[in-house]
């Protein structure tokens, strides 16, 4: 595949309480899961691999470490700014920082997407050898060189809990070819022209998953389709 998009089930307290889908319990288990998927076998040379992460440094370190295992290099970092239908942030940054200082859940009005580029050679080689001690729960991983790292900001209204905006057009623009073979992993909605892989790949492909947003862009509970 020339393009891969992943939204792993990272451990998250709010998602644990409200989410209709399964999440992993630790960063360690996510790293093991990603390795077991053997995605390096389907990543084409020079492919782009986009990974949604949470705000936790440990989660970012896991994503970086996994990408390094198949030679991926971080080339871009996108910020999804969450806004209301009127274009205002769903929560002011000052309010989010105040919640964090006051012992709240530290909500943030944005999410992070990391974009890695695969090696251009015919085979994917690890950027470093995974040592036995690196399989522990301490994720003190050295960051890759980020010279020339491009940062972008996208703005979109959130709808259903944890569902990300559709990035098909934006991501495909980064590939110069007219035809892009793309795969979404941990998908919960099939996208036209893409392959979708996940336990709930068709979860939001029905009419009940649309029109469930209030005036502030907050999601409402979506009934399960039996």
Image (cartoon, rainbow, N blue to C red):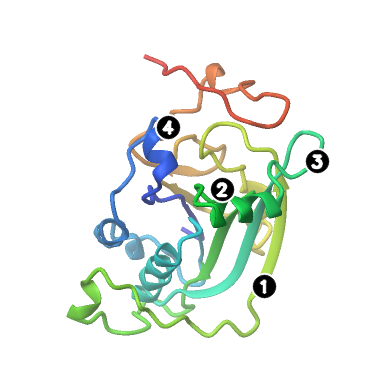
Provide the secondary structure element on which disc 2 rests: loop
Q: Does the CB distance between marks 1 and 2 fall below 8 Å? A: no
Which residue is identified by label 2? 107
Label 1: how many Cα within 10 Å (few below 14, some 14–19, many 20+)? few
Which residue is identified by label 1? 150
Label 2: how many Cα within 10 Å (few below 14, some 14–19, many 20+)? some
Which mark is first along the chain, 3 or 2? Answer: 3
Mark 1 vs mark 2, CA separation in Å: 25 Å
Q: Does the CB distance between marks 3 and 1 fall below 8 Å? A: no
Q: Does the CB distance between marks 4 and 2 fall below 8 Å? A: no
Label 4: how many Cα within 10 Å (few below 14, some 14–19, many 20+)? few
131 left or right of 74 in image? left
Tell me the residue at 56%/58% (across/down): 113
Say which of marks 3 and 1 sits in front.
3
Mark 2 vs mark 3, CA separation in Å: 18 Å
Which mark is first along the chain, 1 or 4? Answer: 4
Q: Which mark is residue 18?
A: 4
Q: Position of residue 98 (x, y in %)?
A: 62, 53
């Amino acid at each position: 595949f020339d393009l891969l998009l992943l939204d792993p089930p990272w451990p998250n307290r709010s998602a644990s309480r409200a989410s209709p889908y399964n999440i992993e319990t630790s960063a360690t288990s996510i790293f093991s899961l990603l390795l077991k998927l053997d995605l390096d076998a389907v990543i084409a040379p020079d492919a782009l691999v986009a990974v949604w992460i949470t705000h936790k440094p440990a989660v970012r370190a896991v994503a970086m470490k996994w990408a390094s295992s198949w030679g991926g290099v971080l080339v871009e970092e996108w910020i999804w700014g969450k806004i209301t239908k009127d274009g205002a942030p769903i929560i002011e940054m000052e309010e989010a920082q105040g919640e964090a200082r006051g012992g709240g859940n530290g909500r943030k009005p944005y999410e992070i997407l990391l974009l890695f580029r695969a090696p251009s050679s015919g085979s994917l080689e690890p950027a470093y050898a995974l040592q036995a001690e690196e399989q522990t729960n301490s994720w003190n991983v050295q960051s890759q060189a980020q010279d020339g790292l491009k940062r972008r900001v996208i703005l979109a209204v959130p709808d259903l809990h944890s569902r990300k905006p559709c990035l098909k057009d934006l991501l495909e623009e980064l590939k110069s070819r007219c035809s892009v073979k793309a795969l979404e992993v941990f998908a919960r909605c099939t996208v036209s022209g893409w392959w979708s892989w996940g336990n709930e790949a068709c979860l939001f492909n029905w009419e009940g998953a649309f029109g469930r947003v209030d005036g502030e862009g907050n999601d409402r509970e979506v009934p399960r389709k039996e």
